[in-house]
Amino acid sequence: MCGTSPYCSAARGRRFRYWTSSPLQVGLRRPPPEAHLGPVLDDTARRAYRHRLSELDRDIDEAEADADLGRLERLRSERSLLTDQLTAAFGLGGRARIAGDPVERARKAVTMRIRAAITAIGEADDGLARHLRNAVRTGRLCGYEPESPVTWHS
């Protein structure tokens, strides 16, 4: 299996971008920078969201002090919705996500397929699926990074 494969040996502990070739010969050609639609949220929208979140925090404190449970529930629901939207608009480290970004689409597609494959593996071998969930990294870079050395047997 993977432990004796030169491809897996070369890939172990390394991370790859989705648009470059790896030892496994997968990846996409890097798209031109103008192939996207710009940030999901512009600076004005981001400031408006953050301003509204500050207002909601003050209103939540006030509703808690007044024990106004109905208002508190509505405010928390709105805050959760805004937080979810901001989370979707920004990646790790606060980097703005780019609308229509082909690299982001590739990242999402690869991540989704890796998770689906690990789920399918889990139906046959829960231990292997658990190992892969802990060892396979996705995000801006993709890689296989086991916590400790693994010897694979075919």
Image (cartoon, rainbow, N blue to C red):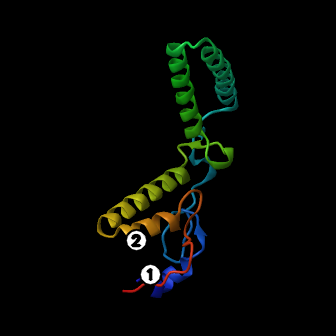
Query: If the image is split into quadrants, where does the N terminus sit?
Result: bottom left
Q: Amino acid at mark 1?
A: Cys
Q: Which element carries disc 1, helix, strand or loop?
A: helix
Q: Position of residue 66 (x, y in %)?
A: 61, 11
Q: Is residue 77 above or below residue 84?
A: above
Nearest to viewer (mark 2 / mark 1): 2
Q: Determine the image quadrant of residue 152.
A: bottom left
- Residue at horizontal 59 percent and vertical 62 percent from the top: 141
In three-dimensional space, the C-alpha distance between marks 2 and 1, rounded to whole angstroms, equals 13 Å
Q: Which residue is mark 1?
A: 2
- Chain-order first, disc 2 or disc 1: 1
Q: Position of residue 10 (x, y in %)?
A: 55, 81
Q: Determine the image quadrant of residue 82.
A: top right
- Residue at horizontal 49 percent and vertical 74 percent from the top: 25
Numbered label attached to residue 128: 2
Report crowding for label 2: few under 14, some 14 to 19, many 20 or more residues within 10 A (C-alpha): few
Q: Which element carries disc 2, helix, strand or loop?
A: helix
